[in-house]
Amino acid sequence: MPLEIPDINWSLLMPQLVIVSTLLIVLVFDMFDAISKKTLGWMTIVGAGIALWSSIDLLQAGTDQTQFNEMFRIDSYSLFFNIIFLVSTILVALVSISYLGSGDKKQGPYYLLILLATLGMMLMAAGNELIIVFLGLELMSLSLYVLASYFRESPASSEAGMKYLLLGAFASAFFLYGIALVYGAAGTTNIPEIISKLSVGDQLSLLSESPLFLAGIFLLIVGFGFKVAIVPFHQWAPDVYEGAPTTIAAFISAGPKAAGFAAFLTIFVDALPKLPTQATGVIVLLAMLTMTVGNVIAIAQTNIKRMLAYSSIAHAGYVMIGLAAANPDGKSSAMLYLFIYCVMNIGAFGVVIMARTADGENLMISDYAGLGFRKPLLAMFMTLMLLSLAGFPPTAGFVGKLYVFKSAVEARHYWLVIFGAINTAISAFYYLRVVVTMYMREPEEELEFKPYPPTLVIGLVLAAIGILLIGILPSLLLDQAQSAVQSALL
């Protein structure tokens, strides 16, 4: 039997090819001691920038095709998520250049792993097969496990990496077993085929009520639930965020969370209406629990990284509202929210990095007392990020929540919207507490802050512009998200 090699349009794979090429260039240049290690960070930024330009170009061209025997799709949906991943990578690389400094000789593997994780995210968003989604998930996860323990001399960083690895391995096992059960019930791992088999005409098929299939779906929810940190699969997030390098905590909270939801939305938005009503009830319950647990526990935190970790859990609950809506508006509003969340969360972690003193990072909320008068620019950036996270107009965070709640109202999930509104009010308390500390509390001791690193300022300025621009002109991004959903191959 002759071997058939599928025809491949390599130009459609340009974003992924650019990331792979950048990865190899960073690997080679890291071998030369004469080259400044900061140069590797700039190479990462340039490579991600070219891949971002390529993704935008393909998105505007209306590219909607599959490659590799329909296992990999290049459509408006996956390209929109590519933009989220690459923007996150560029912002994290910008803040990492100053965070690591020029004396750190291990920067080559650092940027290499960030690029590998980005490639894994892109595979997850473009996967048309559960196996491709799993490969992307593992490529991303294995890179993040190492990055979380990047500071090997730090016990907290090593502990964070170990916890992330052990719990992540269990989650991957659940996910893979779920794929096996779904394949056993549906006879395929192709996502569009699985969704099409769930109904016959206007009637639900036997597959939609198969115990084997429903068990597989439940295990997939467990696997995805760990990656996006929804309750009750969230326990790893606060410890990992606190122990990992702050730049990596920002990275984990942004791109990988968006990648998990990219696959989550791909599989479940179209499948939920074809499953028993209990399946939608499970998603609604998880959204309510995630929002409530994340926000309530965040109130008690005194460490700002742990507070942002529980905040990240709560924001996963808001995205779940769009998933529970299970309609095109829910999908597009979740995509919009993920983009906004990635920018404002990386911005918040960037301010934490900028607030470093000669003694190290100021991680306690009390350390920010009087910051509004001692470092007004720093306090201004932090205030903007926190107001956006809380959902105050005219920031992008307000727009994200508005459209997510709107999609749930259209799906008649009124109680879910009420829960979301209550949780938004709760979150305002702990976000504004930091603002009050910066502007209305006297510092306990005088701290000597480090000078503002130019690359970090550039990253924060870009994040601030994005938050305000989307908040004032949301159609710039919302129209793209809606168009991506309407023209996507799924």
Image: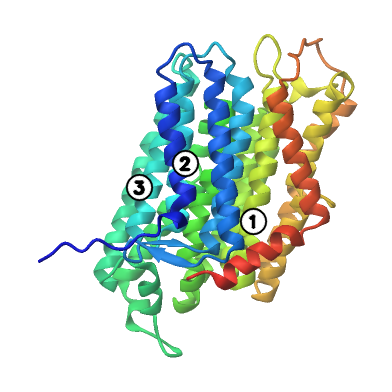
Q: Nearer the viewer, mark 1 or mark 2?
A: 2
Q: Check disc 2: other Cα within 10 Å, few if <14, some if 14-19, many if 20+.
A: many
Q: In the figure, 452 relative to 389: above or below?
A: above
Marks 1 and 2, the one that precedes in the sequence: 2
- Considering the numbered disc 2 on the image, is that residue within a helix, a strand or a loop? helix
Q: Give x and y (percent) for residue 409.
A: 70, 72
How far apart in space, not on screen, are marks 1 and 2 (Cα)? Answer: 31 Å
The amino acid type, in three-letter code, at marker 2 is: Ile
Mark 3 Cα within 10 Å, few/some/many (few <14, many 20+)? Answer: many
Q: CA distance from mark 1 to mark 3?
A: 24 Å
Q: Which residue is mark 1?
A: 318
Q: Amino acid at mark 1?
A: Tyr
Which circle's residue, 1 or 3, is located before the other in the chain?
A: 3
**Residue depicted at x 36% and y 69%:** 214
Instruction: Name the residue rendered at 34%, 41% in the picture.
Output: 169
Q: Which mark is residue 172?
A: 3
Q: Quadrant of the N terminus?
A: bottom left
Residue 46 lies in quadrant: top right
Name the residue beneath numbered marker 2.
19
Q: Are marks 1 and 2 in contact (CB under 8 Å)?
A: no
Q: Is residue 430 visible?
A: no
